[in-house]
Image: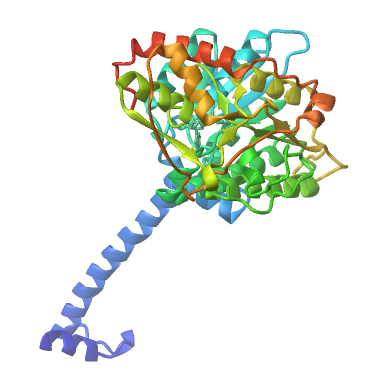
């Protein structure tokens, strides 16, 4: 220590050093050590800058920060990879469109991707295969899509460099943005995942679309949950949506406002779809109709919520095929975006539609239908609706979607559940195979 103190006391002006002094030798040695150290730091910084930073053209600091965070998770590049993307994006019909579907390994994304491909559109999927629910189900959906010629790129919507790369490879005319953190109750466990996917992720998708040339038209999934504590029924697009009952709902509502901004400033054509409790084959294991089926088959009791004063909890259950028709109609009627070079050139289309079934069914009736289809009596456990995000009922007014999209749901709950149960039993066997 005393030696260190000594070194510190040596004058710092080089001219004052005496070459031969032992102090000088010590100083020289120490400087060399320092020099080597700082050289390593400098080289390290260069390495980090060139090899870890996102594409240098990421426009905003926020975007570059997000992409840097997520670049670690994506695996891409290479001619074989690009070839698969181009093959998947190939448009095969005269009036076909070219669509990037985010959340393609998800429930709705899989059905929409398959339907687009069937009618001759070019489709490229994007999904991060997160484990919010059993990823093997997502992998099975991926295999299903592969069989019909849809390739799903594995990556995060926050990965700006990846999204830009996809737009370099394919001139997408449309984006069907379905990737999101879904579920109402999970927000209390992992609130950050909602902000990451539903807010930051949405902004990234819009940023990349805004800079694309030509800009695509975007259709994206909002949710009936934006109606929150609204009590006026049926829910109309004109009703208030400023009382979300969950963080999930709040992020979807924020998404609608963000969409407004990108439409207003950059001329992006944007259509938000407020889905009402979608169900059907290849559905989501976190949704009641799905885990009720599993638990009824396992002989486990199922919670049936009721509101205050024994109030009925009801949902406007909407069958997946009807939702798919609504999504395709929204894509087909989506006008071109008007911006170029990141600048708005004229007013662009901005729409929000309810996609529901317009016939709410009490959750206890849903259970009765499942009992009949499964031929098993459910063990019902009636309990109070907890105040953790779920609302008492949902009911869609769909007249706007009917007029503008020709949307007309045709599947009632009994028919739709029959198809779901048939799929469930063929996928999971007799229900003994476990669903995580
Ligand atoms: N199913 C419904 O009843 C319903 C109702 C209202 C709204 N929605 C909305 O519809 C859309 C589709 O819902 P779903 O039921 O198919 O849900 P889902 O969870 O099955 O599908 C979403 C997919 O997005 C992926 N994903 C999530 N975050 C991602 C990210 N950051 N980057 C890349 N991929 C990511 C997931 O891995 C998943 O495969 C969602 O936006 C959801 O909020 C669904």
Task: Please determine whether, in this image, residue 249 is positioned above or below residue 114.
Answer: below
Task: Please determine whether, in this image, residue 149 is positioned above or below residue 14.
Answer: above
Q: Residue at x 36, y 14 (%)?
A: 428
The location of residue 357, given as percent across then percent down, is: 68, 25
Going by the image, does 352 lie left or right of 391?
Answer: right
Number of numbered discs visible in the structure rendering: 0
Give the colour scheme shown.
rainbow
Q: Quadrant of the C terminus?
A: top left
The location of residue 310, given as percent across then percent down, is: 52, 42
Q: Nearer the viewer, residue 56 or 351?
A: 351
Q: Residue at x 61, y 51 (%)?
A: 244
Can residue 413 be spotted in the picture? yes
Residue 110 placement: quadrant = top right
The location of residue 248, given as percent across then percent down, is: 54, 45
The location of residue 410, given as percent across then percent down, is: 69, 15
Q: Nearer the viewer, residue 155 or 382?
A: 382
Q: Nearer the viewer, residue 5 or 117?
A: 117
Task: Please determine whether, in this image, residue 405 is positioned above or below residue 179.
Answer: above
Going by the image, does 407 lie left or right of 163?
Answer: right
Q: Nearer the viewer, residue 168 or 365?
A: 365
Can residue 105 be spotted in the picture? no
Residue found at the far front of this picture = 309
Going by the image, does 325 lie left or right of 182?
Answer: right
Q: Residue at x 52, y 11 (%)?
A: 419
């Amino acid at each position: 220590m005393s030696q260190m103190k000594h070194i510190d006391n040596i004058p710092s002006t080089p001219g004052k050093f005496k070459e031969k002094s032992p102090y000088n030798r010590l100083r020289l040695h120490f400087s060399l050590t320092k020099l080597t150290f700082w050289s390593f730091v400098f080289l390290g910084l260069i390495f980090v800058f060139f090899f870890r930073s996102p594409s240098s053209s990421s426009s905003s600091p926020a975007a570059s920060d997000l992409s840097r965070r997520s670049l670690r998770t994506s695996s891409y590049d290479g001619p074989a990879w690009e070839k698969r993307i181009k093959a998947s994006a190939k448009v095969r019909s005269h009036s076909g469109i070219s669509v990037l579907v985010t959340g393609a390994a998800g429930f709705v994304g899989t059905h929409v991707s398959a339907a687009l491909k069937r009618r001759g559109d070019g489709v490229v999927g994007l999904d991060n295969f997160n484990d919010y629910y059993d990823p093997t189900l997502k992998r099975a959906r991926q295999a299903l899509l592969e069989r019909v010629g849809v390739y799903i790129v594995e990556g995060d919507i926050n990965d700006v460099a990846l999204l830009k790369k996809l737009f370099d490879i394919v001139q997408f005319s449309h984006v069907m943005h379905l990737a999101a953190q879904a579920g109402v109750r999970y927000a209390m466990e992992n609130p950050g995942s909602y902000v990451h996917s539903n807010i930051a992720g949405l902004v990234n998708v819009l940023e990349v679309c805004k800079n694309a040339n030509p800009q695509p038209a975007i259709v994206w999934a909002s949710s009936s949950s934006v109606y929150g504590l609204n009590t006026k029924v049926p829910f109309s697009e004109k009703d208030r949506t400023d009382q979300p009952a969950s963080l999930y709902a709040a992020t979807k509502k924020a998404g609608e406002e963000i969409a407004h901004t990108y439409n207003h400033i950059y001329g992006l054509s944007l259509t938000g779809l407020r889905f009402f409790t979608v169900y059907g084959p290849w559905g989501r294991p976190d949704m009641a109709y799905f885990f009720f089926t599993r638990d009824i088959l396992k002989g486990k009791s199922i919670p049936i919520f009721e509101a205050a004063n024994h109030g009925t909890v009801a949902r406007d259950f909407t069958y997946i095929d009807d939702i798919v028709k609504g999504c395709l109609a929204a894509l087909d009627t989506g006008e071109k975006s008007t911006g170029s070079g990141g600048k708005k050139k004229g007013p662009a289309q901005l729409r929000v539609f309810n996609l529901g079934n317009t016939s709410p069914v009490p959750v206890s009736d849903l259970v009765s239908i499942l009992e009949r289809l499964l031929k098993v009596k459910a063990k019902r456990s009636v309990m109070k609706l907890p105040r953790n995000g779920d609302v008492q009922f949902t009911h869609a007014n769909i007249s706007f979607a009917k007029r503008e999209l020709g949307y007309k749901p045709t599947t009632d709950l009994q028919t739709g559940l029959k198809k779901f149960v048939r799929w469930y039993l063929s996928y999971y066997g007799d229900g003994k195979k476990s669903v995580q």
